[in-house]
Image: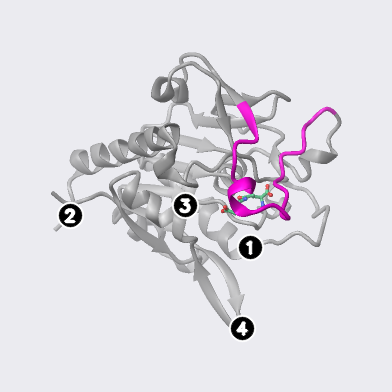
């Protein structure tokens, strides 16, 4: 049986004096091993991509995390800390992609930067530094720690009863990792909160009234996926949604 194709939009970066479109290995591996789908890396070519062609060829989209931030001009703000990395080519690709994919009912799983760009693409805004907001926790990792500690459980999140996430995972609080400086400020209209951290920060949302599966997570379920039953359930739910989408529309010959 054909596997669903999952687009994974790339970041851009320079390696030496050349430009590259890149995706971290753990994300494409999670599409294969966690969702049982076939990943296809989408270059960050912005308006040069013919979006309808790309969307017609896929059955799901995974929006990855990245060190870069969504450019605040997308939510009518100035950059507060110019030292933080940006990736305008990724923004120019993912913003229209997200809106068009939701209209088509293409399943979306969004992680960390992907979670943030989904909120912004739909009209929401971000806190550019959560740790600078009175009453909020510092949600950043300590870069001096070894990676397994940086991606270790950092805090719990409380799931909204009866929501998309609680239906997949059950109602109990879960422990999550936390590697982000930015976070949801204004939640876009049409989004439903699926989970919050103890300080009230939105940690997961879905798109209400979307014809397809949508789930956006501020944490990283792709990290050490095979060892985490909660993360495996999340990727399995995404994979099932992609299989249903493929089964319903078929694969054009
Ligand atoms: N830059 C944003 C997004 C944070 C993010 O996606 N972190 C993960 C980077 C590495 C990875 O993909 O594992 C912010 O700081 O809020």
Mark 3 vs mark 4, CA separation in Å: 29 Å
CA neighbours of label 2 inside 10 A, class few (<14), some (14 to 19), many (20+):
few
User: Looking at the image, is 216 positioned above or below residue 8?
Assistant: above
Q: Position of residue 21 (x, y in %)?
A: 50, 70
- Mark 3 or 4, nearer chain start: 4
155 sits to left or right of 77: left
165 sits to left or right of 180: left
Which image quadrant for residue 126?
A: top right
Q: Which mark is residue 16?
A: 4
Q: Is mark 3 within 8 Å of ligand 1?
A: no
- Mark 3 or 1, nearer chain start: 1
Q: Position of residue 148 (x, y in %)?
A: 58, 49
Mark 1 vs mark 2, CA separation in Å: 33 Å
> Which residues make up the magenta segment?
135-156
* Residue pictured at 35% horizontal, 34% vertical: 237
- Mark 2 or 3, nearer chain start: 3
> Of residues 84 and 120, which is closer to you in this image?
84
Q: Position of residue 226 (x, y in %)?
A: 39, 43
| Residue 51 sits inside the magenta stretch | no
SS state under label 3: helix
- Mark 4 or 1, nearer chain start: 4
């Amino acid at each position: 049986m054909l596997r669903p194709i999952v687009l994974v939009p790339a970041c851009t970066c320079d390696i030496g004096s050349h430009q590259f479109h890149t995706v971290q290995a753990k994300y494409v591996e999670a599409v294969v091993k966690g969702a049982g789908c076939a990943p296809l890396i989408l270059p960050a070519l912005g308006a040069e991509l013919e979006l309808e062609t790309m969307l017609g060829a896929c059955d799901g989209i995974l929006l990855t995390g990245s060190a870069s931030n969504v450019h605040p001009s997308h939510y009518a703000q100035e950059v507060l800390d110019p030292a933080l990395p940006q990736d305008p080519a990724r923004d120019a690709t993912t913003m229209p992609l997200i809106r068009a994919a939701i209209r088509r009912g293409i399943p979306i799983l969004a992680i960390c930067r992907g979670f943030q760009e989904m909120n912004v693409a739909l009209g929401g805004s971000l806190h550019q530094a959560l740790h600078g907001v009175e009453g909020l926790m510092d949600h950043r990792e300590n870069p001096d720690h070894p990676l397994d500690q940086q991606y270790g459980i950092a805090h719990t999140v409380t799931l909204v009863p009866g929501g998309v996430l609680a239906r997949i995972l059950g109602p109990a609080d879960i422990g999550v990792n936390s590697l982000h400086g930015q976070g949801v400020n204004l939640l876009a209209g049409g989004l439903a909160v699926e989970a919050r951290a103890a300080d009230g920060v939105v940690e997961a949302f879905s798109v209400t009234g979307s014809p397809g599966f949508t789930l956006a997570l501020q944490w990283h379920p792709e990290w050490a996926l095979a060892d985490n039953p909660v993360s495996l359930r999340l990727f399995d739910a995404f994979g099932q949604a992609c299989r249903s989408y493929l089964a319903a529309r078929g694969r054009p010959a």
